[in-house]
Image (spheres, rainbow, N blue to C red):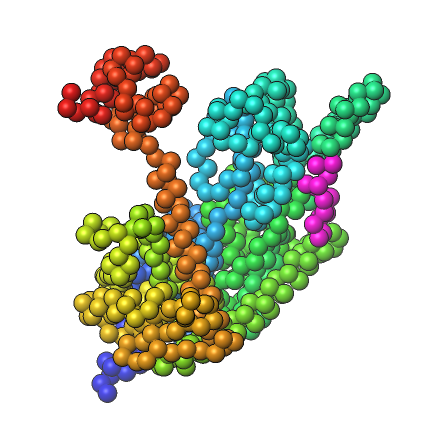
Amino acid sequence: MTEADSPAAPLARGVEVIAQVVATLPGTPGVYRMLNGKGDVLYVGKAKSLKKRVVAYTRPDRMPLRIQRMIAETASMEVVTTRTEVEALLLESNLIKSLGPRYNILLKDDKSFPHILITADHDWPQVLKHRGARNRKGEYFGPFASAGAVNQTLAALQRAFLLRSCSDSVFSSRTRPCLLFQIKRCSAPCVERIAPGEYLALVEEARAFLSGQSRRIQNDLTNRMSAAAEAMEYEKAAVFRDRIRALARIQAHQDINPADVEEADVVALHQAGDGVCIQVFFFRSGCNYGSRAYFPVHAQGEEAPEIMAAFLGQFYADKMPPKEILLSLDPAETAIVAQALSEKAGRKVVLSVPKRGDRKRLVEHALDNARDALGRRMAESGAQRKLLEGVAEVFGLEAAPERIEVYDNSHIQGSDAVGAMIVAGPDGLMKSAYRKFNIRSAELTPGDDFGMMREVLTRRFARAQKEDPDRDRGLWPDLALIDGGKGQLNAALGVLEELGIDDVALVGIAKGPDRNAGRERFFLAGKEPISLEPRHPVLYFLQRLRDEAHRFAIGTHRAKRSKGLVQSTLDALPGIGPKRKKALLHHFGSAKAVAEAGLPDLESVEGISHAMAKKIHDYFHPEG
């Protein structure tokens, strides 16, 4: 073995690359990125002094093994200077969140938080659940830990304030009150059962309640109920009574809910062995909006304060921090983290570790939840690992698969055909890796399941060859399960043969006689079909994967089909926007009637000029 081939050679080369960069670095704050030979980002770090921080990587013997591996892979570096250390921390958090470097502590958070939205783009504001980009005009309240927490609060809000939840299109088409009015969950503004001024007063009350003025709203309702009762207006008093009860449901204590915690997140970290769990409780307007557990990756061997600091930076990179964050321990560089979050929020954000009282009990409660969640996670991971080892034994794989991909198709007589891929690994289902494929080929005959599977697998693995040719980015499966029997398996084998791929294990899974679950047969290339005992744990595991792929494929197909059903032939008309389309449909009743209408009839529609009417008529009657 030559010196260049020794295990220490890559580490020495990495140190040399870093040393060359250090010679050019200033002693100012900034962010640095370590890149490998292909330009992939390995690590993102920030520093108060770039030169002093980066020079430490030239002494790898003092670094953990994980960082030594990172140095050995480093082929180049990129550096961005900032004015302050706070700016460096904010930039570092955003880059880690967007790039997901393999050597950073990472927060795997693929779900956005739901909010409650009171719209402001309609004369009669609507209250609804909202998730995603805030691109609709109105006020947003939250975050809530789950859709269930939002739904419970929305139901109580409807009883308390009688605001509409229907869409604008349903609202405009109503001619009489819907069921929600009958069960006293809406004031029926659609048919003007309430005056505009009274409805807007309800909207203001709901807005004030969600903004933390719950006590004032309740006192006001109590006074109005008493006044109505004294005036012997008992039905009116009963309405106020029901509204007060609904507000009480929203404010009902969930676990520990201190009265003096108006707007805060509670963040507790528990570390055991190589596992870490961080539990977050959300308190807004004095109410507990639920909790969520997180399991940062690449945190093995890191100190708890470092993990907490990394978590806070990434967690709030795309979320507005609350006024107060109660912690189970101080993060590394607490003052810098607090200053960065304050700068992001545009107001002061207080980080504190409570020492006594209700706040301490609240943090301890979150810490108990983190401990329990990590215990469950570790137990589930152990069970999952045993199942993966069982899969390897059943199918004769060299090792337990780290990534299993399952494929399925869905269509109705060939229409709206889609393919679906789900992914599972040692930590369970990897939903952020799920993919859907709209079948594009015009050459396929309707219902050609084999052709659909060929298209899906061709696109999937051709892309993997392009994006991860060296297979070091975790994009390749160790095992691919195909929903179907020998025919589907042969179609899949043909695709991999054409692409020159011979090291991905393929298995077809088909239901047994009469399509009975529990009697599945598994097809492998060049072997007789395999059947497992009905109570075999690996069989149950594979059934769950197959069913999840089936669920995802059907859901994707239904979404595509529903989108097609609501589309109209008018959508293809040039120059026809939502308002004109609505006017045409209201006048004629259907797109078909619009297509059959004569020029004078089209001109009679409000908002349709002679030129536009002629354009519409010519579109549907090109022959003249």
Q: Which residue lies furthest to the front in this view?
A: 514
Residues in magenta, as a range: 245-260
Residue 79 in sight: no
Q: Residue furthest right?
A: 230
Rendered residue at 76%/31% (across/down): 241
Query: Depth check: 217 or 441 in front?
Result: 441
Query: Quadrant of the rendered structure where residue 276 is?
Result: bottom right
| Relative horizontal placement of residue 123, taking residue 216 as reference (left or right) | left
Q: In which quarter of the image is the N terminus?
A: bottom left
Q: Position of residue 3 (x, y in %)?
A: 24, 83
Q: Position of residue 33 (x, y in %)?
A: 35, 58
Establish if 180 lies above or below 19.
above
Q: In which quarter of the image is the C terminus?
A: top left
Query: Depth check: 595 or 438 in front?
Result: 595
Q: Position of residue 38 (x, y in %)?
A: 25, 63
| Relative horizontal placement of residue 381, taking residue 56 as reference (left or right) | right
Residue 398 in sight: yes
| Relative horizontal placement of residue 457, taking residue 154 as reference (left or right) | left
Rendered residue at 34%/35% (across/down): 567
Q: Residue furthest bottom?
A: 1
Rendered residue at 49%/29% (across/down): 170
Query: Quadrant of the rendered structure where residue 494 is?
Result: bottom left
Q: Position of residue 569 (x, y in %)?
A: 29, 31
Q: Per the image, is 332 magenta?
A: no
Establish if 481 lies above or below 393.
above
Rendered residue at 39%/42% (across/down): 562
Establish if 282 lies above or below 602.
below
Establish if 602 lies above or below 82.
above
Total marks placed: 0
Query: Depth check: 12 or 66 in front?
Result: 66
| Relative horizontal placement of residue 405, taking residue 453 as reference (left or right) | right
